[in-house]
Amino acid sequence: MNVAAPEYRYHTLVVTVENKAGVLARVAGLFARRGFNIESLAVAPTDDDLFSRLTIVVDIESAPLDQVVKQLDKLVNVVEIRELHPGYAVERELMIVTVEAEPHRRDELVEHLDRAGGKVLSVGTDSMMLSLVGPPKRIDEFENLLRPFGIVELQRTGRVALAALDGEH
Amino acid sequence: MTTTPKDGGQALIRALENEGVDLLFGLPGGAILPVYDPLIDSSIRHVLVRHEQGAGHMASGYAHATGRPGVAMVTSGPAATNIVTALCDAHLDSVPLVCITGQVPLGAIGTDAFQECDTTGITMSVTKHNFLVTDAQDIPRTIKEAFHIATTGRPGPVLVDIPKDIVDPNNPHSAMEWTDDVEMDLPGYHPNIEVDPAGIAAAADLMRAAERPVLYVGGGILKARAAEALRQLVEMTGIHVVTTLMARGAFPDSHELCLGMPGMHGNFTAVTAMQEADLLIALGARFDDRVTGRIDGFAPDARIIHIDIDGAELGKVLRPDIAIQGDCRLAVEALVADFSANGTGDADRSAWRSRISGWQERFPLAYEPWGPGQALKPQYVIERLRDLTPDDTIVASGVGQHQMWASQYWNFDHPYTWINSGGLGTMGYAIPAAIGAKAGMPDRMVWAVDGDGCFQMTAQELVTATVEGFPIKVALINNSYLGMVRQWQEMFYDERFSEVFLSKDVPDYKLWAQSMGCEGMRVDDPDEIDAAITKANEIDDRPVVIDFRVMAEEKVYPMVPAGATNWDLVVPPSQADLPR
Ligand SMILES: Cc1ncc(C[n+]2csc(CCOP(=O)(O)OP(=O)(O)O)c2C)c(N)n1
Ligand SMILES: [Mg+2]
């Protein structure tokens, strides 16, 4: 457990939990009860099916990071907590979005998409479904770019993260 | 039970026996029925309660008095919800409990079946941990884990929810193969008790240098069985001690270095010494708002050493200068070792000592003496009770004015003699907790100091006490009011009394007590107090209830008004003009 100096508002915790019924409810209940704000939360099994991994982005304006970590650590099903320092984490998020796309605006849209490195998933008469994987900030920017076109539906996964390899940011 | 368990129900009972359980507080019903059958053949004694909340508080009283985990067993649905208050109570006061609840059969879970409720969901936030067991084979391991979690680290309540089919021998799901060696599987639970030597050395240095140090002792000292070590530390260093509501008895009240209880209704000297301190050494205490008052005005000049088994307490309310996570007994012993090796320093504390004795002289606990025509003085009743009972009497209390007077006016000279609901403030705690204490400590005298409001919440457990043979004694401090609420309305709501008057005439507590098989007495006259207490002390074959008719207008002093800082402690009128 390695707690970084809380100079950033959002901190990413990678939490390994036992893969048991109700564990997510325990984590969510703890955050609700103690008034800790979750900015984003992603859950998935790990390569070991006894454990799952939660990637939780916490807003440390709601509570000091070390309180969040220590309270989480008290949950019996929480096995390990790693704090990824914002400067030293590789973070990714997936967004899929359906955008209004009348035929005459499609070129412009696809240009934006190519520049961002996204994909076209499906094309309808007046709309397109796109996907983008990237650091959360890039997803934010892309979402803003799309807004003037008219967003029909949008879904983001919340971020997942791993510690950066040596020296990499 | 001597034969090898063949099904989940038998395995559950055997697992409890293997944990050393001698007493089980509970009440059966549909979902837990199959477990009550093998119980007949068990060495475990079951105490049949009249309400499941009572079972939980009895288990808690038992745990406080004995240091062993209390165990309760109840059925599903309404029984599980009835015990939620007791679980929450134990959670806030870190009491080791194991609670077994029945649950509808696995296949019925989630269907809104009869007496189904989401027990693990409901109790998640009021237990240290809970389990829903889904396989009979897992029962022995889960029970072992439950006791381990309840009793190690910071103790607390653990609930084990058991679906009926896995304990019912008529159901194939209950089949299991018993083995004596079960391994716990708790990859995320590793409570640390060791204390960091560098932290101890730094703490000892601060203590050596401090001119106005105070040891702020909380319930954690009792949980860590550290009273003896604490006494050594105090006598070695000469540092004054305050004992919180949860720690009364952890250090003897009659010791010259004991300042009594701090907090909202604390002794003037205890509260003021903390405010004026240059160093607070918090041992197993959690800077509860009832102790600190408004936090931004709390002990402004004090540096803080905070030692607690629960790392999350360190920095939760205040940032300590030195934070030490670990077992309080080990920490206190390490401090003692450090002082033995390196001396206790030569800080000049003479001015501090004389200020303290000045406060003690000017601001002792005080109340207006009784006058003819008045009802009894509640404080006087407690003083007589204190003086007429054996030194090691166990006192359990309800919640309200009577609780504060009991804590203030009793003289606690032994650990584990004071049992009350501190964190949750659960009215109705006294009687079942006293029963649990008596069940665990049958040779000790156990008195419940109860309020009339509290009494009416759990009095039916006196039937349990009579039938099961637990001759506790109840001092009912009967002011006809929800007195503590009345006090707030008098002081902070312009004497506008709203829904606090109970009744002067009903119930008739003496008759009610008699109807439950207890000795019932009623005392209106101060001259009758001693005789009534003496008579009660002599009765050992049934419970006793004494209805003491006390003054409704009496208030608990001192008092820190809610939202005020501890500087604004209100003292009794007779001391109001004295220089602080
Ligand atoms: C279950 C519960 N309900 C309400 C309260 C709020 N409360 C705190 S003290 C008190 C009055 C208790 O009355 P009584 O038992 O007569 O004690 P007294 O203060 O008169 O000594 C009340 C209602 C509480 N603490 N617990
Ligand atoms: Mg009352």
Image (tube, coloured by chain):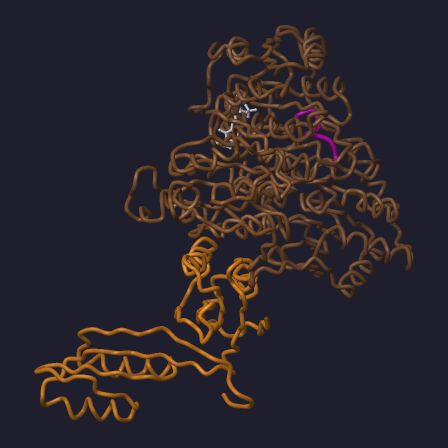
Quarter of the image for residue A112 reads bottom left
Along the horizontal axis of the image, is B128 left or right of B347? left
Chain B: what color? brown
Q: Give the residues drawn in magenta, as a range.
A: B573-580
Question: Is B138 a magenta residue?
Answer: no
Q: Which of B411 and B261 is in front in this view?
A: B411
**Residue B74: percent from left, percent from top:** 46, 35
The chain displayed orange equals: A
**Residue B205: percent from left, percent from top:** 83, 60
Q: Can residue A57 be seen in this view?
A: no
Looking at the magenta stretch, what is its main secondary structure?
Answer: loop
- Residue B531 vertical position relative to residue B467 in the rendered view, above or below: above
For the view shown, which residue lies furthest in the front direction? Answer: B3
- Residue B207 vertical position relative to residue B66 in the rendered view, above or below: below
Along the horizontal axis of the image, is A121 left or right of B265? left
- Residue B221 vertical position relative to residue A96 in the rendered view, above or below: above
Q: Is residue B372 visible?
A: yes
Residue at image position (68%, 19%) is B368
Residue at image position (17%, 78%) is A150
Give the quarter of the figure containing the C terminus of chain B.
top right
